[in-house]
Amino acid sequence: MADSINALYSHYSVIFPVDDVAETIKWYETNLGCSLSFSYGEPVNYAVLSLNENLRIHITKKDDDFKPSGRHTVIYVFVHDIDKVFDHMKSRGLTSGELVTADYGMRDFDITDLNGYRITFGQGA
C-alpha cells in the first residue's frame, strides 16, 4: 500500500515567508547565484528562485510576525565540492563559521540569509 501511495508524490518545495520579496530575490541572485524562475503579483509577493533544476526556494510576502529560528537549519543543501562552495561563500562574507567535519559523517558549514534563515551546505566526509 505504501509503495502505491509514494508513487503519487512528485516533488516538494520549501517556502520562506519574508518581509521584502524583491530584496530577498536580489540577495539570492547576488550571493547564491540563483535565478528568478517565477514571480507573482505587483508588487511581487511570491517568487521561485532556482539555483539549478533540482534546487529551488519559494519565497512569499509574510503577513504575520513569524521569525525564523537562528539555531535550526531550514535547508540542508548537498553539494559535490564542499571546499569550492565554502570558499565561494566565505569570499562573499556569508559563512557564519568554519567548514567542519561533523560526527555524523558530513563536512558542512552554515550561512544565514538576510531574513534569518539558516542554510547548511554539506558533503559526505
Image: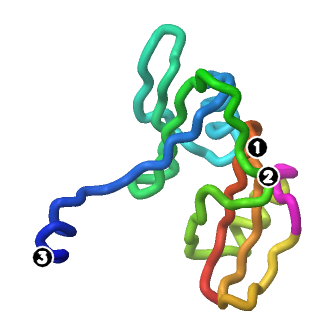
Q: How is the image coloured?
A: rainbow
Circle 2 residue: 70
Give the amino acid type for the residue marked by disc 2 in the picture: Gly
The quarter in which the N terminus is drawn is bottom left
| 112 horizontally vs 56: left or right | right
Q: Are marks 3 and 1 in contact (CB under 8 Å)?
A: no
Q: What is the number of the mark on residue 1?
A: 3
Label 3 vs label 1, nearer the camera? 3
Does label 2 or label 3 sit earlier along the sequence?
Answer: 3
Give the amino acid type for the residue marked by disc 3 in the picture: Met
Give the amino acid type for the residue marked by disc 1 in the picture: Gly
Measured in 3D between alpha carbons, the distance from the residue under mark 2 to the one under mark 3, in whole angstroms, is 39 Å
Q: Residue at x 62, y 38 (%)?
A: 29
The residue furthest top is: 42
Mark 1 element type: loop
| 61 horizontally vs 58: left or right | right
Does label 3 or label 1 sit earlier along the sequence?
Answer: 3
The quarter in which the C terminus is drawn is bottom right
Does label 1 or label 2 sit earlier along the sequence?
Answer: 2
Please state the extent of the stretch shown in magenta in the rendering: 92-97
**The one of 123 and 1 positioned closer to us in this rendering:** 1
Q: Are marks 2 and 3 in contact (CB under 8 Å)?
A: no
Q: Residue at x 59, y 59 (%)?
A: 75
The image quadrant of residue 71 is bottom right
Mark 3 element type: loop
Mark 2 element type: loop
Q: Are marks 1 and 2 in contact (CB under 8 Å)?
A: yes
Q: What is the number of the mark on residue 116?
A: 1
